[in-house]
Amino acid sequence: MRILIVEDEVHLSEALTQILKKNHYSVDAVLDGQSGLDNALTGIYDLLLLDIMLPEMDGITLLKTLRCEGIATPVIMLTAKGEISDTITGLDCGADDYIAKPFSTGELLARIRAALRRKGEVIPEDGLKFGDIELNTSTLKLSCKGKELKLILKESELLELLITRKQAVTSKEQMIEKLWGFDSEAEHNNVEVYISFLRKKLAFLNASVRISTIRGVGYVLEAGL
């Protein structure tokens, strides 16, 4: 899951980034509303954490613009205590939830999980299952038929993406945007390397699940017989 933080308080933005990365989210963070809008309009994010008071463009205007452009990405507004009118305005303009500063890490993570569930994403509690494999995104362990091994983080993120795509073909461009970020210098061969690693680990586990290449299009996860 990829989250965009739009927050102009540098220390808070950095703290949120560390918390989310520690909980295995991919994170981009920007410090002003215009940069937030430019990033959000790419459509690559699963959720936005959006402050209201921002330089260059306030959070409410950013949110209105996103919804007018047809971007339905879930948005959680970050509000200060006492900003009741702004909170109401944000919810009326299409925000999915809000959380008042200061907030606890547990509450923030719970609200993120809830917003993603409402969006229809798979938010695993014990693991993601597909065919005869199970991926625990917290421990990065991949298991099959009583055997298990540990993935590195990027392998886990890539396999999670393929599982949650529900057998839809995923292009290399989509993988780069979701796992590395749209402004990353990652290239197609980075994807190919991690696909190769995953295929070898699936084979080691004797899994019937396989990663198929759709030539000229991308990759799809398939459950064997």
Image (cartoon, rainbow, N blue to C red):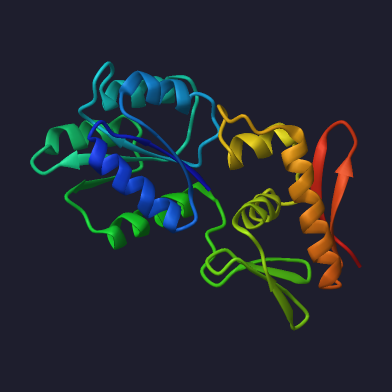
Rendered residue at 27%/26% (across/down): 60
- Position of 126 with respect to 86 (left or right) is right
Residue found at the very far top of the displayed protein: 56
Exactly how many numbered labels are in the figure? 0
Q: In this rendered view, identify the residue nearer to me: 164 or 190.
A: 190
Residue 48 visible, this orientation: yes
Rendered residue at 47%/50% (across/down): 116
Residue 170 visible, this orientation: no
Q: Give coordinates of residue 132: x percent, y percent.
A: 78, 71
Residue found at the very far bottom of the displayed protein: 146
Q: Give coordinates of residue 168: x percent, y percent.
A: 75, 44
Q: Which quadrant of the figure has residue 130?
A: bottom right
Q: In this rendered view, identify the residue nearer to me: 86 or 169.
A: 169
- Position of 150 with respect to 132 (left or right) is left
Rendered residue at 82%/52% (across/down): 196
Q: In this rendered view, identify the residue nearer to me: 94 or 15.
A: 15
Q: Give coordinates of residue 91: x percent, y percent.
A: 28, 36
Q: Which quadrant of the figure has residue 218?
A: top right
Q: Which quadrant of the figure has residue 225?
A: bottom right
Residue found at the very far left of the displayed protein: 82
Rendered residue at 60%/66% (across/down): 140
Q: In the rendered image of this protein, does residue 185 appear above or below residue 12? A: above
Q: Give coordinates of residue 111: x percent, y percent.
A: 35, 54
